[in-house]
Amino acid sequence: MMNVKMVYLNGDVVPYEQASVPLLNTSFRYGAMVFEGIRAYWDDKTKALNLFRLDEHAVRLLESIKLMRFEAAYTQEQISQAVVDYLKVLAPTQDVHLRQMVFLDSDEFYYARGPLQMAVAAVPMGRRRGFEKGIHCNISSWRRISDQSVPPRIKCAGNYQNSRLAHIESIESGYDYPLILNDRGKVSEGAGSAVMLVRHGALVTPPVTADLLESITRQTLIELARDRLGLRVEEREVDRTELLLAEEVFLCGTAEEVVPVVSVDRVTIGDGRPGSVTCGLQEELLAAARGDSERYSEWRTRVPN
């Protein structure tokens, strides 16, 4: 059984209690921390752990560092290797979700740019709530943050206050999860996940210019939909009412993987059950991530035993 009380901090794997951040740390005070959520899948047949799309997560983390104007302290290779080194010590034998964080080691004002620290922590994680039967969503009254103000393309801690407010509102209103429109009234994303739908037989998803995080899972599903399911894919603006008329709606992300949406604003989507495209993409994503075949081997990084 893996020890979740051990974390990676600046090159060492240390007990959780020792991985502390000072109270006046700039990142703690102002949310100036960028991060990635990464999944690693246990393959029981080969007794090996596969990190899914590790390189793509490292590239996105570097992009967040650049856009936050942090000093350039890490290479892509260092970011990826930190995750591998940590998992070699942890040696989990189950699916895990990792949070890789880069933050300011400073107590200066919010315009500080360095020095930086990097931490990685893991928790066991299987399928998320709603993976099999679906969830009920609402259209949030909150609007998505904009590239003109607080760019959602940056995966930083501060940006998630937008999602937090929308998610709290959704739960208090009797729903499971919010869908968020941008300031132009078009569908952007969920509170921490991308949104996709099936309309007239095509897989449809908002473009990366719709004020959303450039989701690695979203791009993965676009490729799987074309290559494995033979679907036409449309990346375009999506109206609110299209969600209600869609044959299928689902959320996707590293943590969520593929979660069906069975109603929006209490309007039933399709027949109220996860659709064939959604279920097909669930199967294809897990097969690619776990290594059930040789396909997409470039997406997997095996952790040495």
Image: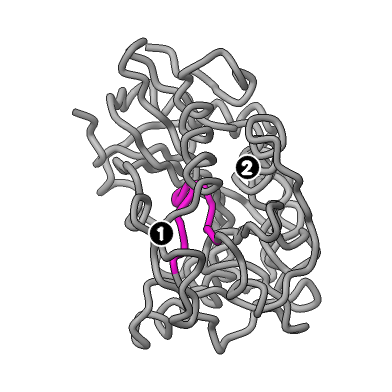
Label placed on residue 245 = none
The residue carrying mark 1 is: 273
Write down the region rendered in magenta: 249-262
Residue that appears at 51% across and 46% down: 276
**Disc 1 residue type?**
Arg
Query: Where 191 falls versus 185 (above or below)?
Result: above
Label 2, residues with CA under 10 Å away: few <14, some 14-19, many ≥20 = many
Secondary structure predominantly adopted by residues drawn in magenta: strand
Count of marks placed on residues: 2
Task: Quarter of the image for the N terminus: give it.
Answer: top left
Residue 182: % across, % down = 70, 78
Tell me if 15 is positioned left or right of 238 in this view. Answer: left
Label placed on residue 221 = 2
Q: Quadrant of residue 69?
A: bottom right
Residue 181: % across, % down = 65, 78
Question: 32 or 225: nearer the eye?
Answer: 225
**Disc 2 residue type?**
Leu
Query: Where 37 falls versus 54 (above or below)?
Result: below
Residue that appears at 46% across and 57% down: 260
The verdict on residue 252 being magenta is yes
